[in-house]
Image (cartoon, rainbow, N blue to C red):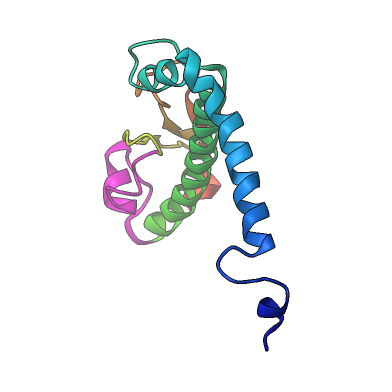
């Protein structure tokens, strides 16, 4: 005879009943905010119709932070790719970025085109993502590109 059968383990064993009770308790507590319309406001807030619940704002902030990290990583990778490009084709021009790394790679985490200001012998250049709004502003993500980076 199995251990489960000896201890009343069948379909409604003690472990499953306790697990179900915990899930119902947690679910009941989690569903409580829905009764006052909070959840409905949160969902409509995601579409921009109503203000977001505080937790949703935190999630959006975390998503934006993750996109900044991903974009910085992509910019560093592009800087390395530009070095390879320069060895084959010479120093890159501003219009060479898509040719050097490909259209998908030359796009930031928000789907906007990354721009290159090539370095010159007397000044550093930069790679820039204009961030979530796609326009020059304080939320831009950029890294410098020196002459040594492309030679």
The quadrant the N terminus occupies is bottom right
Which x, y percent locates residue 151?
48, 53
54 magenta-colored:
no
| Residue displayed at 34% across by 15% down | 48
| Residue displayed at 42% across by 15% down | 41
Q: Is residue 57 above or below residue 66?
A: above
Q: Which one is nearer the viewer's eye here, 14 or 118?
A: 14
Q: Which one is nearer the viewer's eye here, 45 or 99?
A: 45
Q: In the picture, residue 85 is in which quadrant?
A: bottom left
Residues drawn in magenta: 88-108
| Residue displayed at 33% across by 21% down | 47
Which x, y percent locates residue 76?
52, 47
Q: Is residue 143 left or right of residue 13?
A: left
Q: Which one is nearer the viewer's eye here, 1 or 90?
A: 1
Q: Which one is nearer the viewer's eye here, 66 or 126?
A: 66
Q: Is residue 144 left or right of residue 132?
A: right
Q: In the picture, residue 117 is in which quadrant?
A: top left
Which x, y percent locates residue 37?
45, 14
Q: Is residue 96 above or below residue 45?
A: below
105 magenta-colored:
yes
| Residue displayed at 50% across by 33% down | 63
Q: Is residue 119 left or right of residue 20?
A: left
């Amino acid at each position: 005879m199995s251990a489960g059968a000896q201890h009343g383990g069948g379909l409604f064993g003690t472990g499953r009943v306790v697990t179900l009770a915990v899930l119902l308790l947690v679910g009941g507590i989690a569903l409580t905010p829905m009764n006052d319309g909070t959840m409905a406001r949160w969902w409509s807030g995601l579409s921009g119709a109503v203000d977001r619940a505080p937790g949703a704002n935190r999630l959006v902030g975390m998503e934006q932070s993750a996109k900044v990290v991903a974009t910085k990583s992509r910019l560093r990778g592009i800087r390395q790719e530009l070095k390879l490009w320069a060895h084959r084709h010479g120093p890159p021009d501003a219009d060479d970025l898509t040719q050097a790394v490909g259209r998908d790679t030359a796009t930031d985490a928000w789907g906007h085109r990354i721009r290159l200001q090539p370095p010159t012998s007397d000044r550093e250049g930069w790679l820039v993502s204009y961030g979530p709004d796609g326009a020059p502003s304080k939320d831009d993500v950029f890294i410098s590109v020196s002459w040594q980076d492309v030679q």
